[in-house]
Image (tube, rainbow, N blue to C red):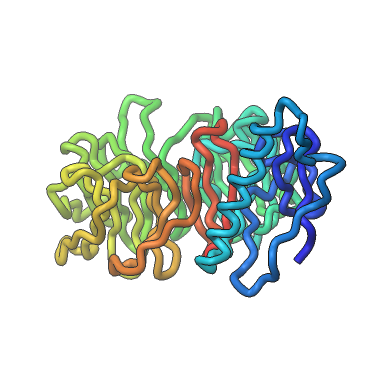
Amino acid sequence: MDTIKFCAQCGAPLEEPDARFCPECGQPVDDLVEIAAVPTASAGPLQREPSTGAGALLPENPLRHNRLKKFLLPLLVVVVLILAGFGVKSVFFKGHAISSPVVFAGGQVFYINTNDDYQLYRMNPDGSGKEKMDGSTAFRLVADGDWLYFSGMELFKIKSDGSEKIQLDNLWLDELAVGNGWLYAEEGQSDTSGISRRRTDGSQSEFLNEHQITNLVLDGDSLFYRNVDDNYTLYRTKIDGTDEQRLVDDQLDYTGLAVQDGWVYYANDSDSSKIFRVRVDGTERTRLGDDYASYLTVAGEWIYYSNGDDGGKLYRIRTDGSNREKLNDVRSIYISCDGTYAYYAEADHGDRLSQVRVP
């Protein structure tokens, strides 16, 4: 195993040999920071540098005790995690912050960088290749095939490779969902407010209902949403606005709603934000866990969420409620996952964009 290096500013260990940004004191060195790179249980014994030079613990140094804490505490954590066989690595990206989950298209990750005037950015899944994609203001972002749709002061679509950009409307829309050749949204800037849809080429638009809604999700031939006008309960309607029905009487938390494989997953405000699931026809309502959950999303066989009973840290459980796991040690919001990485904002650090590789 490589020798651990130390920060010249505070003495904390820099666990990546080429790290140029201290995870302890924030000494800026690069825009990519390894904050919890932990070796596996098969790694060799930990080493430290000699007691001279940057980060050394000097006997007569008046800051000795503080530096000793800064070294021993992270080292103790590393040792404990090694013994536990824990091998999760998480990173955050300096200067990049988000106010909504990232989206995936064309093998890349797209997000709205709130630290750069809410403009559209993209990067590779591992965090490399970060670049600004478009200079228009964006507040909502969704993807469908090779196209991204975003709403700021106007509504646009843009190819995921940046090659083509088209304005679809001159108004701001909320709660976007896209598929089946239609873009669905919550619209409230006209005489009529409610769920609207418009062709993805901008050729036709119409209202489906007049509900105030949040958490709009498109799945197959149905739309699912939290109906603010009916006590924040879960609703389903066909994509043409017909056959609307309330699925459960529970009040839903506003931060998360996911639909996958015939199930709707949600945080139930009527039961202290516990995770529930229900069939898309409203049957087999089941509680899946005991955590206070928010910002939940589903990827594959896992539900990812912010655990309010543990400081909002990132957790996951299987979609049947088994195998509960903790994934990080920061308050995590705006969660999404591509099956390889979980992406989130660190709420206590300016909503900075972060990621963790999922086991």
Q: Quadrant of the N terminus?
A: bottom right
Placement of 103 over or under 180, stated as above or below: above
* Left or right: residue 25 compared with residue 356: right
Q: Quadrant of residue 276?
A: bottom left
Q: Residue 334 location, x and y as percent?
A: 47, 44
Give the side of residue 145 with respect to residue 249, left or right.
right
**Which quarter of the picture shows residue 112?**
top right
Q: Residue furthest left?
A: 249
300 above or below 49?
A: below
Along the viewing direction, whichever of 160 and 231 lies nearer the viewer? 231
Which residue is drawn at the image coordinates 70% and 70% (left, top)?
44
User: Residue 30, can we see it?
Assistant: no
In the image, 252 versus 318, the foreground residue is 318
Q: Residue furthest bottom?
A: 42
**150, above or below 342, in the image:** above
Kindly tell me whether residue 7 is visible in this rendering: yes
Q: Is residue 112 left or right of residue 336?
A: right
Residue 319 in the image, given as x and y percentages of width and height: 33, 66
> For residue 226, what is the image quadrant?
top left
Q: Residue at x 79, y 58 (%)?
A: 3
Identify the residue shown where x is 12% and y is 48%: 249
Q: Residue furthest front?
A: 60
Residue 134: x and y in percent read 70, 39
